[in-house]
Image (spheres, grey):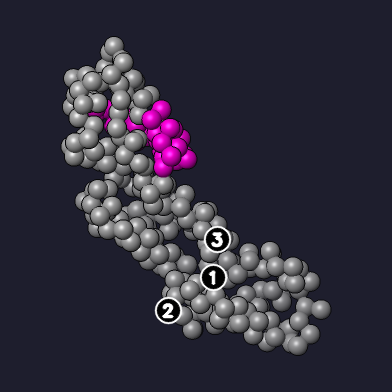
Amino acid sequence: MKKLLFGLALLAFVGCGQKKWTKEDAKKKCIADANKDNESKDIPDDLKNKICDCWADKAVVNYKSAAAADKDSSSTAFKEMGFSCMWNKEIVGPMFRNEFKGKAELEGLGDANINKIADCAAEKVIARFKSLAELQKSEDAWEKIGEDCANEIIWNKGTLKMMILEQFKKEEDMQTVEIGARNKIADCVADKMLSKYKSFSEAKMDDSEVEELSRTCVLEVLGEGGGE
């Protein structure tokens, strides 16, 4: 979350050397500072551009000069001005999306489902918290809301089966199993997971047992000989 929510350095505008205070100057400096900051430099350029565009609009209205903005950069009002530019689904959604795409347990889910989870999480977090600053006071809220939405989107047989089949593509011993049998095994595993666990979060915390369910399904479908 820290990496995605921009370090305060992104919002700490430093513009004392500029002769004229314009939106273009403010936006350029905002982006330049974000690219230098360790916690925000890896944020996708399109997000930085949107946030800094919004911030620049506010900065030139609220401050008469770059020096005035720089002088006030440690104030709560200044930081809230930046936070407000991030508190909308257009920004928060991609933040969740980028984080989910890096999670190994969501591999095989597909972009469409990742987008559904991200949109769900963005809507919930914005509805629950008034601002980014308020969200940051609750350290586990970001992760918990993301998990809740993943459970909503993933915890059905169709999506689970798709993820299981994607995982099979990476397993060497499944390559000798014909496609029809793989589908039956995936059906079996999905059914057993839905029967045993209440949510995706619960299942992913019990990896060894899920692996055992998979082995059981292989035996049920293929018999003792496996895929050989």
Q: Is residue 147 left or right of residue 157?
A: left
Q: Determine the residue positioned at 41% across, 47% down.
A: 3
- The span from disc 1 to disc 2 (Cα, nearest Å) is 13 Å
Magenta segment range?
A: 32-59
* Amino acid, disc 1: Leu
Quarter in which the C terminus is drawn: bottom right
- The span from disc 2 to disc 3 (Cα, nearest Å) is 21 Å
- Res. 208 image quadrant: bottom right
Whether residue 5 is situated above or below residue 24 in the rendered picture: below
- Res. 60 image quadrant: top left
According to the image, label 3 marks what residue?
104
Q: Position of residue 59 (x, y in %)?
A: 24, 27
- The span from disc 3 to disc 1 (Cα, nearest Å) is 15 Å
Q: Is residue 171 magenta?
A: no
Q: Which mark is residue 160?
A: 1
Going from N to C along the chain, the mark reached first, 2 or 3, is 3
Q: Position of residue 53 (x, y in %)?
A: 33, 30
According to the image, label 2 marks what residue?
198
**Which of 145 and 183 lies nearest the eye of the viewer?**
145
Pointer 1: residues within 10 angstroms few (<14), some, or many (20+)?
Answer: many
Whether residue 61 is situated above or below residue 135 in the rendered picture: above
Q: Position of residue 174 (x, y in %)?
A: 73, 71
